[in-house]
Amino acid sequence: MENRDLLLLSSSKVGDTPYLSHALQFIEQHLAYANNIIFIPYAGIGMTYDEYTEKVNLALRSINKSVTSLHTFTDKKEAIENADAIIVGGGNTFSLLKKLYESELIDEIKTAVNSHGVKYIGWSAGANISGLSIKTTNDMPIEQPISFEALALVNCQLNPHYSEYKPPGFNGETREQRLTEFMTIEPETLVIGLVEGSALQVKGKTYQYLTADNIDQPLYLFKGGIKRSVLTAPDNLDI
């Protein structure tokens, strides 16, 4: 994992901001030397893969970057092997992981990122699958992958869109309560809660917490029944 270079974004928007606009400064830096950028649209529900790809390209136009969607390639493994960077968009995490397993791309992506230094960007569902499993996703299981095990690009769980907000009169479980349930089952596994507008940048063994200019919330860490918050990510995040 010493070659890994990851940008894991909690969300594609913050409030009413334009699509990906809050993260363009991070994305531009991350993709500075990348030309052959492969986009994986498989989490997209309610739009075609072509529409999703165009949406991403429109957002990246201001930084002079463009992506080619994986669904347009006949040999998808070869497309991953030849990529300078891989971007995985948000949507439904279960659908995304199901399609990656069906396409036999899990190992291909892991090898590209961990061994060949291919850059990885994921937001929402795309960030979710970078962890050990998708057990801490917020999404509804509208499709069933053959396994919940994910890419394991980081040795922990991710929970994008993390929020402590509880609507008045709401009697369902809060996000914190759901993650507490996970800690009960897997007390030794770290969960990282990323608020909207934040990101985790991973270079080799070093972790850095990034936030959009108007975000002043911390990074939330859950492990062994304990929740803590930090403004700056420790290098090893205790994993």
Image (tube, rainbow, N blue to C red):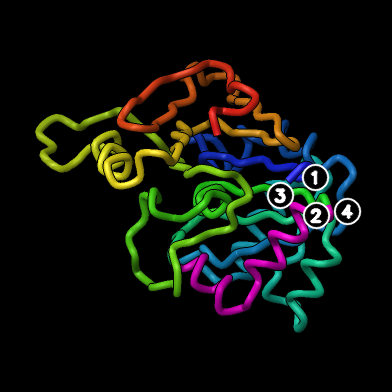
Please provide percent x and percent y for residue 35: 88, 53
Q: Amino acid at mark 4?
A: Asn
Residue 77 picture location, percent across and down: 75, 74
x, y percent for residue 30: 78, 39
Badge 1: how crowded within 10 Å, few (<14), some, or many (20+)? some
The residues tagged by marks 3 and 4 sit, at their Cα atoms, a distance apart of 13 Å
Name the disc covering residue 214, or none: none
Which amino acid, by three-letter code, is at mark 2? Ser
Q: Position of residue 218 (x, y in %)?
A: 47, 20
Q: Is residue 46 visible?
A: no
* Alpha carbon separation for disc pair 1 and 4: 18 Å
Disc 2 to disc 4, how far (Cα)? 19 Å
Give the mark count.
4
Question: Label 1's element?
Answer: loop
For the residue carrying disc 3, how many other residues have a C-alpha within 10 Å: few (<14), some (14-19), or many (20+)?
many
- The residue drawn where x is 32% and y is 60% is 140
Part of the protein shown in magenta:
95-116
Which residue is the site of mark 1?
3
Residue bearing mark 3: 120
Q: Nearer the viewer, residue 1 or 54?
A: 1
State the residue position of label 4: 35
Question: Which of marks 3 and 2 precedes in the sequence?
Answer: 2
Q: Secondary structure at mark 2?
A: loop
